[in-house]
Amino acid sequence: MILIINSGFFVVLLLQKLYFFRLYMEKFRIKFIVFLVLLVTFLGYSTTLYFTQTEQLAYPNTLAQKGKMLWQQKNCVSCHQLYGLGGHLGPDLTNVYSIRSEAYITSFLQSGTQVMPNYHLSLEEIQAFIEFFKYTNTTGVADPTSFTKHFNGTISQQ
Amino acid sequence: MFLFSALLFGLAGALEYIIPGFWKDFFSFEKIRPLHVSSAVFWILITAIGCVLYFLKEHNNQNLKQQKLIRWAFYIFVLSFVGILISYSFGIFGGREYWEFNPVFSIPITVGWILFIVVFMSNFKTLKQQPVYLWMWFTGVLFFLFTYLESNLWLIPEIRNHLVKDMTIQWKSYGSMVGSWNMLIYGSSIYLMDKIAGNKTYSFSNIAFWLYFLGLFNLMFNWGHHIYTLPTQPYVKNIAYVVSMTELFIFGRIIYFWKSSVSDAKKHFHIGSYRFLIAADVWVFLTLGLAILMSIPALNIYMHGTHVIVAHTMGATIGINTMLLLAFTYDIFGNQTTRLKTEKFGFWLINGSLLVFWISLTMAGFAKSYEQFNNPEVAYGEIIRQLRPWFYVFFVSGCGLVVGFFMVVFPLMRRWLNGLKTLEKSSNSE
C-alpha cells in the first residue's frame, strides 16, 4: 500500500521534472494531474478502509452495544481513554476488565469518585458497561509498555 | 465570543486538575471539556471562513456574489454552534473523541458548509493561472466537507459495531479535517504575506506549489500517527510513519530560511498582522518539531496518552491557528493603531504565557510517561497527584493567556465597532 501511494506520487513528480514532458504539458496541467493522482489514491485508500474488516470481532451482544452507546451518551471519553485516545483526567479503560474485577468496576460506577460524579446508573446500565469493557478487553492491549521497539522506529506487539 | 468561551472553559477545566472535583457536583469535566474544545473549533472555523471570504473579495477586487447565501450560512453556523454549546449544559453529547456533539447538529452544519462551498465556487471560475492560496482554499473547502461527513460514518451500524474499525475511521476523519481547516488558514496566511510584501511572486512559485502538494499529501495520509497503539491494519501505521517523515522537508526549510525570516520580521514587526504571522512561524517550528517526534512510533508510545499530546494540540490551535487568525483580523480591522501599549503588551503576554503553558504540559506528559514505564504499579490517581506542580504552572500561564487575549482582542473589537459606526454614518449621509 505504501509502495502504491508513494510510487504514484513520485512518478508524477519525476515526470514533471523531465524536460520532454514539460513540452507537452503546460504548468497547470501538471498541477492538475498531481492533484488528481493524490485525490484518486486518497479515495481508493479511504474506500479500502471502509470495506476492510479489522481482525477484531464485532460486539458479541446487544448489551455490549448498549454499553458503547452509554459510553458515548455519558461522554466518558472526555476523562477516560480507549487505546490512549481520550481525556487525561481518568485512566485508560481498554483493559480495565482484565486488570480489575467486575466488582471493582461496579463499585466505581455505582458511587463515582472524588472527581467522577455518581451517574445514578441502573443495574442494567452497569451490566452494559461491564459487557462493553469485557469486549474492549478482547480487542487488544493498550498498555504502551507492551510494545517492542525496533531500530527503524517501528513498534510491534505480541 | 467563541474564543473567550474556549479560554474560560479551558481555565475551568484546568481547575479540575489542581482542585480535583471542584466543579463535580454541578458542572463536571465531561461538560467542561466539550464546551472548551467545541468553542475553540467554532472560533477557528467561523473566523477562517470569514477571512477566506474577505480575502477572496480582495483577490477578485470586487464584491462577493451570493451575499444572501453568505448571510444564511452565517446564521446557520452561529445557531448550530450556540445550540451545541447549550446542549452540553443539558448533558446531551455525541461522546466522540474529540470534537463531539449530538449528531442531529451535523445536519445544519453540513447545510451551512454546502452553502459556503456554493458561495466560494461562485466567486472563482478556474484554478488555471491562480496563486497557490486559491488552490489551498479550494482544497480546504472540499476536504472539510468530505472529512466531516466521514466523521459521521459511525452512525452506520456496520462501522459502529466494530470498535477498532470505528476508531480508525474516526481518527482518519478528524486527522484530515484539521488538515482541511489548516488549508484555509495557511492559504490565507500566504495571501496576507504576499499582500504585505506587495507582490505575488511566492504564491505563483514552484516551491509554494511543492509545499502545497506536500501538505495535501500529509492531510490525506499521515493521520495514522494518532493511532499507532490501536490494533488496526499495520499498513495504516506504516503509511502514516513514512508520510509523516516527509514533513522533515518543511522543518528543514524553516531552519534554512530562518535568518532571512528574522531580518524580514525586523523590517515589518511594527505591523500588527505581521507580528502575529511571525509568532505563528515560531509556533509552527515548535509544534512541527514535536509532531515529527510523535510520528516516530518508537517515540510515540512514550508520548501517546500523555499531556504531550495536549501540548501539541495547544501549540497548533493557539500558537499557529489563533495567531494566524488574529493576524488576519488585524489586517481586516486595520493595523493603524497597533502601536498601542496594551496591544503590544498583550502580544508578548500571550506568547510568553503560551510558551510556559506548552512547556508545563510537555513536562507533565514526560513525567506521566516516566511513571507509566518505570512504576506501572502506581495508581493513576497518584500519578496525576504527582503531576500537580506542573498543573499549577499550566493554570497560572493559562490565566496569563486569557488576560493577554483580552488585551489584544478588545481593542480589535472596538476598532471593528467604530468601523461599523463609520459605515452606518456614511450610508446615512448618502
Image (tube, rainbow, N blue to C red):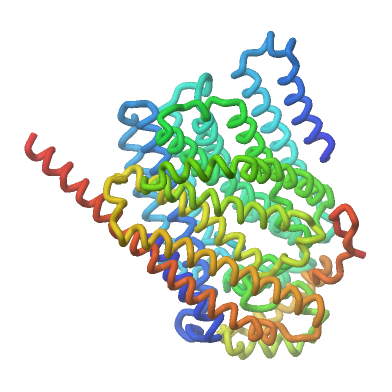
Can the viewer see residue B49 in this picture? yes
The one of B167 and B279 positioned closer to us in this rendering? B279
Above or below residue B105? Residue B24 is: below
Q: Is residue A143 left or right of residue A126?
A: right
Q: How many marks?
A: 0
The one of A139 and A154 positioned closer to us in this rendering? A154
Q: Quadrant of residue B145?
A: top right
Q: Please name the residue shown 28% across and 45% down the image.
A: B336
- Horizontal and vertical percent position of residue B383: 69, 83
Q: Quadrant of residue B377?
A: bottom right
- Horizontal and vertical percent position of residue B275: 42, 49
Q: Please name the residue shown 58% across and 73% down the image.
A: A74
- Horizontal and vertical percent position of residue B371: 75, 79
Above or below residue B25? Residue A155 is: above
The one of A149 and B34 positioned closer to us in this rendering? A149
Q: Is residue B225 left or right of residue B10?
A: right
Q: Please name the residue shown 70% across and 76% down the image.
A: B367
The one of B323 and B87 positioned closer to us in this rendering? B323
Quadrant of the rendering where the N terminus of chain B is positioned: bottom left
Q: Is residue B255 left or right of residue B31?
A: right
Above or below residue B270? Residue A43 is: above
Can the viewer see residue B89 in this picture? no
Above or below residue B239? Residue B388 is: below
- Horizontal and vertical percent position of residue B170: 66, 55
In the rendered image, the residue lying farthest to the left is B429
In the rendered image, the residue lying farthest to the right is A158
Q: Quadrant of residue B366?
A: bottom right
Quadrant of the rendering where the C terminus of chain B is positioned: top left
